[in-house]
Amino acid sequence: MKMDLHCHTSFSDSSFSVEKVIEQAQKNGVTHLAITDHDTTAGIELAQKIGQAKGVEIIPGIEISGYDYKRERRAHILGLYITPGHEALTELCEPYVEARHNASYEIVTRLMDKGYKMTWEEVEELAAAGNGVYKQHIMHALIKQRYTNEIYGELYRKLFFKGSRNQEPGLAHVKIPYIDAVKAIQAIRKAGGIPILAHPGQYLSFEALPEWVEEGLAGVEVWHPIHSVDDERQAEELANKYSLIKTGGSDCHGFYGDEDVPVGSFFVTEEILQELYKHKE
């Protein structure tokens, strides 16, 4: 049994359709796949139908774009075995999804005003399958216009730079209010799901974990492509200390991520599934 508990589709910010994601999972021997699109559960019903036909069990999930307002840093929260379309998730995520889409429109307008050859319609078309335009879709449009040949390269860093004491923000940096991580944990629980702290090594979320356990956090993502050996060690130690479920997954985004990290490249085994089942009960 092989389980990838973190994966995205074109319903959010992956270049892979639901069909392609599940085909890759099947090819790579994944038996259980969590679809955890950003701030939406819109693709889960379709994924479950395709998964059933291809012999891949789809775990309904979500990844909420959270923020640790106490420490002023991002913090993503995974929800596994959530109820798709639950009002607690919809009410929390829809305003953020709309704000992100509007920010993307502002970004594209700025780029066009500065002479970049692109149109909003072109970018929207790239994002047509999902819940709005993301930075990846904007960068894809710039790739098509030959301004760059990669998503997360020098141009991305230049355009989306947040600014510093000595340097102005990049042309494409637009602030939007992220979702409070604590509210994300609470909403996932209301939706019948299991809240998991995603890739804590990326956003240095380890410090907040003890507080969030008190809010209902039930697991931590240990095995993730971006995690160093030290990140894995810290995550495991905290999981053991606070009796949390240890999860892992590829966080596959297709062309919009690291193409060397396909579905199933990071996974967990049956023991973790049994822990998830126990928590559901």
Image (cartoon, rainbow, N blue to C red):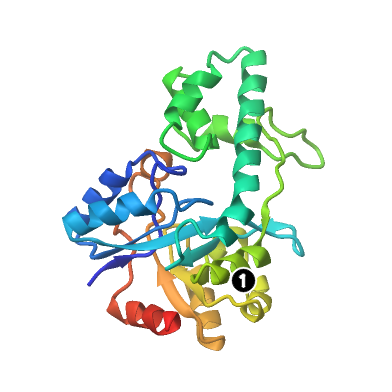
Q: State the residue position of label 1.
A: 206
> Compared with residue 65, is residue 247 higher up or lower down, i.e. above or below?
below
SS at badge 1: helix
Left or right of 116 in this view: 33? left
x and y, in percent, of residue 40 in the image: 50, 51
- Specify whether 17 is left or right of 168: left
Q: Quadrant of the N terminus?
A: bottom left
Which residue is most to the right? 165
The answer to whether 267 appears left or right of 178 in the picture is left
Please tell me which residue is depicted at 65% across the width and 34% down the height of the picture: 103
Residue 106, percent from left and from top: 67, 27
Q: Give above or below for 134 relative to 195.
A: above
Residue 20 at least partly seen: yes
| Residue 261 visible to an observer of this rendering | no
Drawn side of residue 52 relative to residue 182, left or right:
left
Residue shown at 75%/60% (left/top)?
69
Give neighbour class at mark 1: few <14, some 14-19, many 20+ (Cα, 10 Å): some
The quarter of the picture where residue 74 lies is: bottom right
* Residue 106 vertical placement versus 187 (above, below): above
In the image, farthest residue toward the front: 87
The image shows residue 45 at horizontal and vertical percentages of: 35, 53
Q: Residue at coordinates 44% horizontally, 25% vertically from top-left? A: 125
Name the quarter where the C terminus is drawn: bottom left
Q: Nearer the viewer, residue 253 or 275?
A: 275
| Position in image of residue 248 (x %, y %) | 40, 67
* Residue drawn at point x = 55 percent, y = 80 percent: 238
Which amino acid type is marked by label 1? Phe
Of residues 160 and 129, the one nearer the viewer is 129
Where on the picture, by quarter, is residue 104?
Answer: top right
